[in-house]
């Protein structure tokens, strides 16, 4: 039975979709059967990340509304290690956003895959509950900024309230020099605040910035530092012992630990 990982965040634009697409493809390249599912309903862009936005006919809502079978909506991406993708709907069918419906669908799907990676909406909307309903594990993506960290703190509390057993942190868009100078929060400060185990530290990377326009995926680019770290995260998911390089930084502020 496959493991379901939901990738979430407090605020939008922190790199969830980038994380989902790169981790999913990295796992697929390591011969795992992987489905990436876009539950960012109404704001879909996982399809864009892998360049299939023009060819989508059915989406996740059509499956939930029983307009088509899941097989019809799932797309296999040949150039990306054979990863499957279940695209989100562009329009919101509010009645369909029932966490139980998603749960039922993913329960059926999990037999066919080793990993299902879910891209979820930011924040705490109903879509968030649907996205986490069936997951075994949640990755929270955070940027080294106070606003991002504070919003993640809320999400982590919600995940804990939902009894998510495994919660891991991805710190994304790290600029090592700025971090070292103490211009951004550093890794220890973030960990101190959020109190969840780390699964990866991804640097700010030009390859990520140009990936959509150039129709490339960082994990497929040997020059991409971010791609390399997403690959490492995939290895850590598989249980390999790949050490995380912590970028040290000077502490400027004193932060209170999360209260539990
Ligand atoms: N490591 C990174 N380096 C550079 N740009 C990044 C990185 N991660 C994300 N981005 C950029 O940030 C923006 C938001 O990322 P996205 O994955 O769409 O966020 P979310 O899904 O959380 O809303 C995108 O333009 C993306 O290219
Ligand atoms: Mg997104």
Image (cartoon, rainbow, N blue to C red):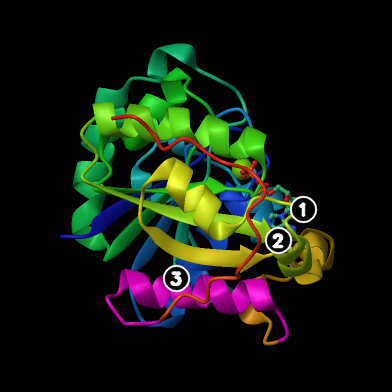
Q: Position of residue 213 (x, y in %)?
A: 84, 61
Residue designated by label 2: 179
Give the answer, above or below, for where 228 lies relative to 170: below
Is residue 108 rendered to the left or right of residue 152? left
Specify start and end residues of the magenta stretch as a single range: 223-242
**Residue 81 appears anywhere in the view:** no
Q: Are marks 1 and 2 in contact (CB under 8 Å)?
A: yes
Mark 3 nearby-residue class (10 Å; few <14, some 14–19, many ≥20) = many
- Residue furthest to the top: 95
Give the mark nearer the N terminus: 3 vs 1: 1
Give the Cα distance between marks 3 and 2.
21 Å
Foreground residue, 137 or 244? 244
Q: Which mark is residue 233?
A: 3
Depth check, mark 3 against mark 1: the one in front is 1
Give the answer, above or below, for where 1 lies relative to 11: below
Foreground residue, 27 or 138? 138
């Amino acid at each position: 039975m496959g493991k379901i990982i939901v990738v979430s965040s407090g605020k939008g634009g922190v790199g969830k979709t980038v994380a989902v697409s790169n981790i999913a493809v990295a796992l697929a390249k390591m011969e795992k059967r992987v489905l990436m599912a876009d539950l960012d309903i109404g704001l879909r862009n996982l399809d864009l990340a892998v360049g299939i936005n023009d060819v989508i006919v059915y989406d996740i809502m059509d499956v939930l509304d029983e307009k088509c079978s899941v097989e019809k909506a799932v797309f296999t991406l040949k150039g990306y290690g054979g990863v499957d993708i279940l695209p989100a709907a562009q329009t919101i069918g509010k009645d369909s956003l029932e966490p139980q419906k998603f749960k039922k669908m993913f329960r059926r799907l999990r037999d066919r895959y080793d990993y299902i990676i879910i891209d979820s909406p930011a924040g705490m909307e109903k879509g968030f509950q649907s996205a986490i309903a069936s997951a075994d594990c949640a990755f929270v993506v955070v940027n080294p900024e106070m606003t991002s960290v504070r919003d993640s703190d809320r999400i982590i509390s919600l995940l804990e309230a939902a009894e998510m057993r495994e919660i891991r942190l991805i710190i994304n868009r790290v600029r090592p020099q700025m971090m070292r100078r103490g211009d951004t929060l550093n890794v220890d400060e973030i960990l101190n605040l959020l109190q969840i185990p780390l699964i990866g530290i991804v640097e700010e990377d030009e390859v990520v910035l140009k990936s959509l326009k150039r129709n490339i995926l960082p994990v497929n680019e040997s020059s991409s530092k971010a791609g390399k770290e997403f690959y490492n995260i995939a290895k850590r998911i598989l249980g390999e012992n790949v050490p995380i390089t912590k970028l040290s930084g000077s502490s400027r502020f004193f932060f209170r630990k999360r209260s539990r």
